[in-house]
Amino acid sequence: DVKVTQSSRYLVKRTGEKVFLECVQDMDHENMFWYRQDPGLGLRLIYFSYDVKMKEKGDIPEGYSVSREKKERFSLILESASTNQTSMYLCASTSGQGGFGGYTFGSGTRLTVV
Amino acid sequence: GENVEQHPSTLSVQEGDSAVIKCTYSDSASNYFPWYKQELGKRPQLIIDIRSNVGEKKDQRIAVTLNKTAKHFSLHITETQPEDSAVYFCAASIKGWGTYKYIFGTGTRLKVLA
């Protein structure tokens, strides 16, 4: 079974803090993604990566950056956390040749910025 | 930009009845359409998917239909059971830089009333 593990289930951070969300997958997938999930808005893509050190902006990258130094690990960074970044953050991965096969999601990190 | 519209946002059905969730996508190049089920407090799980060269796919009580001309696809759940209660997301694949990414609908909260 593919496993996508997010390091924290719940996080509470203060406004202005630098926040790191970590995601690790164990199936040698090339492609990894960060989404945020908000009620009524569905899942919105923040950043994705198709290879080590490669990263592409999704639909809502403002206020975020990412790092992929190793194939299995994809980190989301909130440079200076703000209250409007309070959300559920979901990491996903796929071998996804041609876009087929679907994602495997992590359990999510619920971030609260106070 | 690319988007996926999903309706309805909430759906209540009596146990044993059928449920239908509809999605419309904007990118005519989309060729893969997965559906995810997310139970309360859990990660989204892939339940069924369809490729653009197929009009219909069935797996026990769930089925997905695709109308490429109209850019519509739908999820059908027959003989609903209380354990079908969850949030359902549709998605469409979009060719991104280096890989494919999924654009998600805003979700449908299905309640099956016993």
Image (cartoon, rainbow, N blue to C red):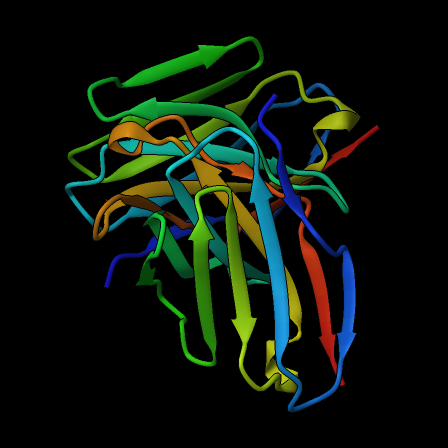
User: Is residue A1 positioned above or below B58 on the image?
Assistant: below
Which residue is painted at 38% across and 31% down in the image? A95
Which residue is painted at 62% across and 81% down in the image? A18
Q: Does residue B105 appear anywhere in the picture?
A: no
Query: Which one is nearer the viewer's eye here, B85 or A97?
Result: A97
Looking at the picture, how far across and down is residue B91, in whole percent? Answer: 40, 42
Is residue A25 found left or right of A69 in the rendered image?
right
Which image quadrant is residue B19 in?
Answer: top right
Query: Which one is nearer the viewer's eye here, B80 or A94?
Result: A94
Which residue is painted at 57% across and 86% down in the image? A80
Looking at the picture, how far across and down is residue B65, in whole percent? Answer: 35, 24
Is residue A55 found left or right of A93 in the rendered image?
left
Which residue is painted at 60% across and 35% down in the image? B37
Is residue B81 found left or right of B66 in the rendered image?
right
User: Is residue A93 positioned above or below B18 on the image?
Assistant: below
- Which image quadrant: the N terminus of chain B? bottom left
- Which image quadrant: the C terminus of chain B? top right
